[in-house]
Image (cartoon, rainbow, N blue to C red):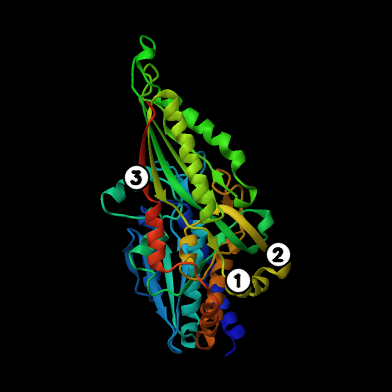
Amino acid sequence: MSNDELKQRVCDAIDRRAEEIIGLGEQIRQHPELGFKEVKTARLVDETFRRIGLSPKTGLALTGVRADAPGRAGDGPTFAVLGELDGLVVAGHPEADPQTGAAHACGHNAQVAGLLGAAMGLLDAGAMEHLAGRVAFFAVPAEEYGDIEWRVKQARAGKLEFLGGKPELLRLGHFDDVDLSMMIHTTSRPEDGKAGVPASNNGCVVKTVRYVGRASHAGGAPWNGINALYAAQIGLMAINAVRETFRDEDTIRVHPIMTHGGSQVNVIPGEARLETFVRGRTLEAIIDADRKVDRALKAGALALGATVEIETLPGYMPMTCDTRMAEYFRANAARLVGEEHYRQIGHRTGSTDMGDLSQVMPVLHPYIGGAKGSGHGADYHIVDKPLAYVAPAKALAMMVIDLLANGAAGARDVLKLAKPPMTREQFFAFQRSMARREVYEGA
């Protein structure tokens, strides 16, 4: 059987399951959960894997679920296809969870539906009989790097080290046997077309900042206080002042939020807290911008005579998509949505923990449409369910065939040509080197 014939058989099997796949995506959309807390979603994935004959492992990096399907046509590499379990807090989203604020405003529900649909199609069509190596169907937690205060507490309690799902899974050894990986992200951007592959993505580090001043009566004796809120405001203004020193080609993004600005209005704030990412195109650019941001934050403490505690956390590494894998995807996308709807996407300035995997193995992180509105915005929603839920299932399954058919010749070719920039040991060493805590006394 040719690869094209096998792909058609698998796509037909996915079409027969289309309503079920869409239903799974909609069910996940209606029950959004935050990273490392995706208990209901993980349970649904586990139950679905078991129902189609797989034997998943659960509780990986708290909530991850992995189920393997061996090829029966010989030994070969392991190809992981991924879907992300988490939502994120989006104020004003009409479908946000009333308790947590979580919403699927980034399309991760469609990713998981596509992952499950790909598994269904490959197994229903008997495709594994024609493939070598192994497919790891992997639902992964916590791509959205939010809820930072809670995650730091989990790390200090010894439940986590890295605060993103994929690097934590990598640390725990759940990718040790994986040779290459991919996932498909939903997009709402018209310029991305119905399908496309980016060249690269920004990486980032994450910072939590605590200004400590001295509380006093705001009306009776404000001169006895040290206003931590004002110190934080000056730190924020100093960050804005250094933005003109960021080079355009480094695509630096710094976007702080204030998570605490005082306890009550008649008390000079004795504490203020910020969180921010420092994003950039390269590790060198991130490190340079990170140093400038620290300097700006210290300026706020110096101006008010406050103390600032700056904790820098390992974020996500810059991502580069494998060009050979992208060629396979382009051919499949043309078959699914038409060549005229495919786009070669340039550099994207958001960050993803697929970047961490890209440091140690070849990866692909394409986009498929079907959504409308602003990513991470209150107006984000799925408008084309077959495109958002079913097309990714087909595209993932077709990539599995491209890479693992014919004795896994496609995967072997990718691995032969790929040159990941780091070993796993080098990756861990670098990320750990970025973790630090500094206290600066402005008095």
The amino acid at mark 3 is Trp
Quick one: SS at disc 2? helix
Chain-order first, disc 3 or disc 1: 3
Residue that badge 2 annotates: 341
Q: CA distance from mark 1 to mark 2?
A: 19 Å
For the question of whether residue 133 can be seen, the reply is: yes
For the question of whether residue 24 can be seen, the reply is: no
Chain-order first, disc 3 or disc 2: 3
Say which of marks 3 and 2 sits in front: 3
The quadrant in which residue 63 appears is bottom left
- Which residue corresponds to the image point at 36% horizontal and 11% vertical from the top-left? 221
- Which residue corresponds to the image point at 52% horizontal and 58% vertical from the top-left? 318
**Residue 87 horizontal side relative to residue 186, left or right:** left
Q: Is residue 411 above or below residue 370?
A: below
User: Which disc number belongs to residue 323?
Assistant: 1
Q: Quadrant of the N terminus?
A: bottom right
